[in-house]
Amino acid sequence: MNQRTSEASDSAASWTRYWQSGFQDTCFFADRAFAVDQLWQDLFSELDSSARIVDLATGNGAVALKAAIFARDHNRAFAISGVDYATIAPAGPTSTDAELVASVEFVGDTDIANLPFHSSSVDCLTSQYGFEYARGDLALAEAVRVLVTDGRALFLMHAEGGAVHEASAARLRRAQSLLQKGHLMMQLDDLAKVLKSGSKSRVYKTQQRVEAKVAAAQRKHAEIPKDDLVWQISQESREILAAIPQVAGADIAARIAHIRAEVTAYVHRLHAMLKASRSARAMDELCDKAQSLGCGTATYTPFMVDEQQVGWSFSARKT
Ligand SMILES: C[S@@+](CC[C@H](N)C(=O)[O-])C[C@H]1O[C@@H](n2cnc3c(N)ncnc32)[C@H](O)[C@@H]1O
């Protein structure tokens, strides 16, 4: 494993939590998911049959697995790897895809700023909402180092002010409101403490405060997507309250500790996402740097879904 700063370790841990829960990708905004199939299909169809493809910051392998599906369906012999610094858990879009998953070399616990590949050994680099999270200059230099001459890089990157960015900023504000002094998370922590104390009257009073906070959160956020963490935590809090008469205090406290860890990791990921989002000016700088590192062409365009910008598509070719 590469040496990491503690910030990078926290960040990787927050993603490990996400991928170990079985998520397949992060392509959604507000309350809807979107597919990025065409971008990747068009790229894969341009590659030689035996192309070596590396998907950077692969997560649970969303793009790497699309490449594997393309190879299977179009009779290509791609050699595909996916790299991520989280401890990933790729499982394929359906549980019957074991063979597909096995056809990809997944390399977890590895920073893309320090790739385990020889120089000039990769024909195509992909990244879907991943490359921009890494330490920019180092990751770009690594990307160019491993590409063969004439090798392609195509990255879908978060766009500052775009629909995904805006939806994530709203999700972050809501999640942070859970963590404020006196709000739901703190009341849940109190509940865990008083359950250990064994005092029935204190448990009862704290239960009532949790109930009030849950009701307030659900009233305030009645319109939010039901997959939003705030909504899920509110629902889970209700289940916890209902379970108190039957379940041991220590088990309830463990569930509350789990919720706290979930919220902390979620806030961490959203912060990282907002920080990773690029303005048009930052994309100009990325293109300039790519050219100075040896890419003859480096360009970007807004990537749109239903007339909403959900990112930048950055494309470069090493010369
Ligand atoms: C938004 S997710 C996208 C994952 C995947 N590409 C997808 O489309 O589902 C961002 C990913 O970047 C990874 N990541 C962030 N910084 C990284 C780094 N320096 N090296 C490797 N992976 C990194 C995270 O662990 C996370 O899996």
Image (tube, rainbow, N blue to C red):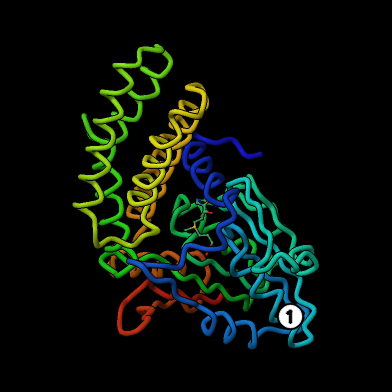
> Which residue is disc 1 drawn over?
71
Residue 70 horizontal side relative to residue 75, left or right: left
Closer-to-camera residue (163/109): 163
The residue shown at (35%, 78%) is 302
The residue shown at (38%, 35%) is 241
Q: Is residue 271 above or below residue 196?
A: below
On the image, the x and y values in percent for residue 160 come to: 29, 64
Residue 47 horizontal side relative to residue 196, left or right: right
Q: Residue furthest front?
A: 245
Quarter containing the N terminus: top right
Residue 93 horizontal side relative to residue 254, left or right: right
Closer-to-camera residue (258/117): 258
Q: Is residue 184 above or below residue 125?
A: above
On the image, the x and y values in percent for residue 153 come to: 55, 72
Label 1 residue SS: helix
Q: Residues within 10 Å of mark 1 (few under 14, many from 20)?
A: some
Quarter containing the C terminus: bottom right
The residue shown at (40%, 58%) is 227
Q: Is residue 153 above or below residue 41?
A: above
On the image, the x and y values in percent for residue 49 come to: 76, 84
Asked where in the image residue 304 lies, by quadrant, the reply is: bottom left
The kind of residue on which mark 1 rests is Ala
Closer-to-camera residue (91/136): 91
Residue 211 horizontal side relative to residue 92, left or right: left
